[in-house]
Image (cartoon, helix red, strand yellow):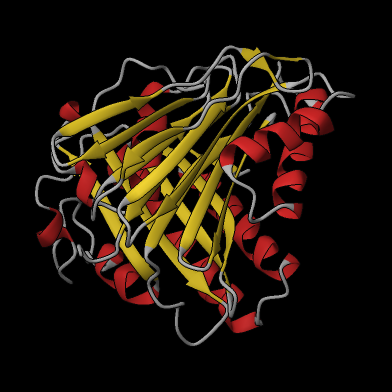
């Protein structure tokens, strides 16, 4: 679940910085790293107010086998940036300021990425790592957004990505309803996935179905991808949407009706091609299904978390938890 902070006016910039530093300290980051994160979030939040008309800052821990970090995503619906490349140059300004914000931020953080369209807003994303260098690039890059419905302290959705011996498995689960009961179901499913890292999508769903019998139940989708083999397997129960985008071609992935923990009549695997640079998208029904990549020129080339945050910004339903996860095959074509 992402920590979500509204930044609609200048007085909320300091609050965003405090939340960032608190998160870093809770994760036992070095004090210097916590300060650097605080500075980066201050720059980001200031830009949200100054240029984006206000928006939201999302933060979540990220990790690798050798390091831990914090991902920061800023979302706004403002006027957008007409020339992103120019905005990253020191001295460029559209607001009468010194214009050092985005340029310095891109050097301060790791894996900086920004997607903006004039008149449609901006999504900015970066990482701050508790190490001298970020982890090396993997064969699959993943990113997602997981947000609780307004008024709830816990999210009834959850997601996880696991990698083992060149294969990667992604799970998105949506506990029925929202609040504590939904969160209990979702976290129970994640625990099963952690206990069975090598299980196929079908086998994992069957195990989760047994484990969730004492909960209110959940919808769930699991996909396993082999990036160098350019292939994947999908299985789903309930209304988690799955699709694969390869070039200009899209394929929807089919889930069967049912509720994990209560009624599952059939679990069936579906094979799909997953070539180099292809995207796999899974999202809960907290994201409307009518969106299309065609409405976002150039978006598919950005970091998966930027893709996820852009779709979330424009298509999240206000009355439900919302989760969207995107994977890209970064393995070179064979």
Is 2 situated above or below 243? below
Residue 152 seen by the camera: yes
Quarter of the image for residue 63 reads bottom right
* Residue 126 picture quarter: bottom left
Q: Toward the viewer: 314 or 333? A: 333
Q: Nearer the viewer, residue 280 or 60?
A: 280
**In the image: residue 256, left or right of residue 254:** right
Question: Relative to residue 286, is residue 79 drawn left or right?
Answer: left
Residue 29 drawn at (x, y percent) = 66, 76
- Name the residue at 71% across, 68% down: 27
Q: Please state which of residues 225 and 172 is positioned toward the viewer in this rendering.
A: 225
Q: Can I make out residue 8 in this image?
A: no
**In the rendering, at what x and y percent does residue 117 appear?**
17, 38
Percent from the top left, x then y, of residue 290? 32, 15
Image quadrant holding the N terminus, namely top right
Q: Quadrant of the C terminus?
A: bottom left
* Residue furthest right as drawn: 214
- Report the residue at 46% width, 66% height from top: 166
């Amino acid at each position: 679940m992402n920590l979500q902070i509204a930044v609609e006016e200048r007085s909320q910039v300091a609050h965003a910085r405090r939340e960032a530093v608190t998160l870093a300290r809770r994760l036992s980051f070095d004090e210097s790293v916590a300060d650097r994160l605080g500075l980066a979030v201050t720059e980001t939040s200031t830009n949200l107010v100054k240029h984006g008309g206000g928006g939201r800052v999302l933060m979540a821990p990220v990790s690798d086998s050798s390091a831990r970090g914090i991902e920061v995503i800023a979302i706004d619906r403002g006027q957008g940036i007409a020339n992103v490349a120019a905005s990253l140059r020191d001295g460029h300004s559209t607001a009468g300021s010194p214009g050092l914000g985005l340029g310095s931020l891109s050097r301060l953080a790791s894996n900086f990425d920004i997607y903006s369209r004039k008149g449609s807003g901006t999504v900015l994303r970066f990482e701050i790592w508790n190490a001298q260098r970020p982890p090396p690039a993997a064969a699959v890059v993943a990113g997602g957004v997981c947000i609780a419905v307004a008024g709830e302290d816990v999210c009834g959705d959850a997601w996880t990505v696991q990698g083992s011996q060149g294969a990667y498995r992604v799970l998105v689960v949506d506990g029925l309803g929202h609040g504590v009961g939904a969160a209990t179901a979702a976290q129970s499913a994640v625990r099963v996935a952690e206990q069975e890292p090598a299980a196929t999508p079908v086998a994992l769903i069957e195990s989760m179905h047994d484990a969730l019998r004492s909960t209110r139940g959940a919808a769930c989708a699991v996909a396993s991808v082999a990036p160098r083999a350019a292939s994947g397997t999908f299985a789903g129960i309930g209304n988690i949407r799955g699709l694969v985008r390869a070039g200009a071609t899209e394929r929807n992935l089919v889930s069967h009706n049912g509720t994990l923990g209560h009624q599952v009549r059939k679990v069936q695997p579906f094979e799909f091609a997953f070539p180099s640079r292809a995207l796999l998208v899974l999202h809960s029904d907290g994201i409307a299904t009518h969106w299309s990549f065609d409405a976002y020129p150039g978006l598919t080339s950005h970091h998966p978390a930027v893709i996820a945050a852009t779709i979330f910004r424009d298509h999240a339903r206000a009355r439900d938890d919302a989760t969207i996860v995107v994977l890209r095959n970064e393995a070179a074509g064979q």
